[in-house]
Image (cartoon, rainbow, N blue to C red):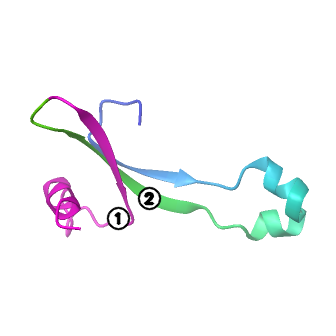
Amino acid sequence: MKSKKQDGIIEIVAPSSFRGKYGAEAFKCAPAIKLRAVKWTAPDGTKSMLVTKLLNTKKYTREKVIALYFKR
């Protein structure tokens, strides 16, 4: 995420090279993957991005996602 947003949904789609390798029909069936990217700055100033499948921003706030990361 190049934006200044601290939390956002990203979508990853199959690259066009997938079509050449597996065929046009398989390319049409390849689902896009939705992920949530959460920017985080550590106390020492290091910037990181956490990527998760926890898309529900009401249930899993940005702060909860960051806290969960350190419990894994």
What residue would you read off at disc 2?
35
Counting residues from the start of the chain, the first of labels 2 and 1 encountered is: 2
18 over 54 or under it: above or below? above
Q: Position of residue 59 (x, y in %)?
A: 20, 70
55 over 3 or under it: above or below? below
- Magenta-colored span: 45-72
Nearest to the observer: residue 32 or residue 47 = 47
Residue at left offset 65%, top offset 67%: 31
Q: Position of residue 50 (x, y in %)?
A: 32, 50
Q: Quadrant of residue 49?
A: top left
Q: Is residue 43 left or right of residue 69?
A: left
Is the N terminus in the top left, top right, bottom left or bottom right quadrant? top left
Task: Name the amino acid type tagged 2.
Answer: Leu
Q: Quadrant of residue 6?
A: top left
**Label 1 neighbour load within 10 Å: few <14, some 14-19, many 20+:** some
What residue would you read off at disc 1?
55
Callout 2: SS: strand
Q: Quadrant of residue 23?
A: bottom right
Q: CA distance from mark 2 to mark 1?
A: 7 Å
Q: Are marks 2 and 1 in contact (CB under 8 Å)?
A: yes
Callout 1: SS: loop
Q: Position of residue 21 (x, y in %)?
A: 88, 58
Question: Is 57 within the magenta?
Answer: yes
**Label 2 neighbour load within 10 Å: few <14, some 14-19, many 20+:** some
Residue at left offset 90%, top offset 54%: 20
Task: Name the amino acid type tagged 1.
Answer: Leu
Q: Is residue 61 left or right of residue 13?
A: left
Question: Is 15 within the magenta?
Answer: no
Q: Position of residue 43 (x, y in %)?
A: 9, 35
